[in-house]
Amino acid sequence: MTVAVVDMRSAEAEMAFVETLKRTGFAVLRNSPLDAQRMARMVDDWRDFFFGEEKWKHLAEETPSGNTSGYIPPDVSETAVGHDVKDLKEFFHIVPDTILPAGLASDAESHLIEAQALGRLLLGWLDIHCGSALSAGLRGELAESISPADSLLRVLHYPPLTGDEPPDAVRAAAHEDINLITLLPVSSEPGLQVLGRDGKWTDVPGLPGDVIVNSGDMLQEASGRQLPSTSHRVINPSDESSNLSRISMPYFIAPDLDIQLSEKHTAGSYLRERLDLLAR
C-alpha cells in the first residue's frame, strides 16, 4: 500500500487528500500550515524533558472530561488492544488547562491552536466531499463537531532500547486510533508503518515538516467504513546505529461525545466500549 503525499499548496490538494484517506486511511501533508521550525524545536525540548527529572513533578491526573493530563511513565504506559505486553514508551498528555513545564508551554499551546485549525480545515474537506457517506448526525457537520476538551495532544518518547525489554515488546504495537482524525508531525526517527489490505506492512513516507493524517475508528463508524481506520505500528530500531530516542507528537481530534456516530453508537458510547476492551 502506498500512502500519498499531498502538497497543500497544490490546487488539487483537497481532492487528493480525500481520495488517499478513502483508499488507505492515511495521507501525508506537505507544506501544511503547522510551523515546521516550532515542531523541530519541540522535538528537541521534549526529548530533554523526558531525559530529565522534572517529568516526575507532572504525573498525570484524570480530567473532568475523562482524559488524562500530564506525564505517564513507562511502567503504566498503555497496552494495545489484543496485545499482552506494554508498549515501550512514555508520554505526556496535553488537554485544555494542563499544567505544562514552563519552558515548553508556549510552543505546545501555539502548536495546539494551529493543529486544531488544521483539523477543522481537513474535516471541512471531508464534509464537502464525503457528506453523503456520513451519519445523519454528522452530515456536513464534521468540522463543527470538534471538542477541544475531548481531543488530546500526546507527546511520546520512545527511549533507546537497553536489551532488557520483555520478549515481543515493541515501541507501539499494531492498533487503530479511536478518534475522528489524528494529526502527526513526521517523527524525528523512522519506525511508523501502516498495514495494507494485502497484509503487508509499509513504511509511512514523509520529510521533516510534513504532517501525517489518519482516520480513526469514530470516523470509520460515522462513514459506514468508507473512511477506513487503518492499523499501524511503530517498530523497534533494527540495529545499534538506529537505536535512538524517538519523539512523536500526535494530536487526536475527537468530537463532542454526545454526537451520534451511527445508529449503534454515540461518540461517548464508542469510547466507553474501547476503554472497556483496554481494561480487560
Image (tube, rainbow, N blue to C red):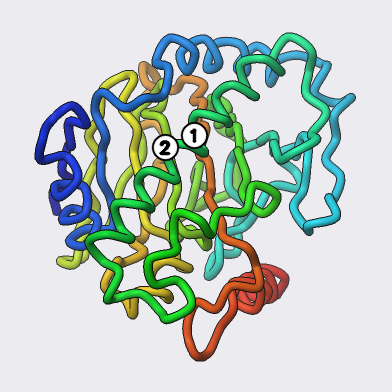
Label 1 Cα crowd, 10 Å radius (few <14 / some 14-19 / many 20+): many
Looking at the rendered structure, the secondary structure element under dot 1 is helix
Q: Quarter of the image containing the N terminus?
A: bottom left
Q: Position of residue 160 (x, y in %)?
A: 54, 25
Q: Which residue is mark 1?
A: 115
Q: Position of residue 85 (x, y in %)?
A: 60, 57
Looking at the rendered structure, the secondary structure element under dot 2 is helix
Q: Amino acid at mark 1?
A: Ala
Label 2 Cα crowd, 10 Å radius (few <14 / some 14-19 / many 20+): some
Direction from residue 98 to residue 154 in the image, left or right: left
Q: Which residue is mark 2?
A: 118
Q: Residue at x 26, y 38 (%)?
A: 28
Check whether the beta carbons of the residues at disc 1 and disc 2 lie within 8 A of each other. Answer: yes
Q: Position of residue 173 (x, y in %)?
A: 47, 53
Q: Quarter of the image containing the C terminus?
A: bottom right
Direction from residue 17 to residue 140 in the image, left or right: right
In this picture, is 154 found above or below 202? Answer: above
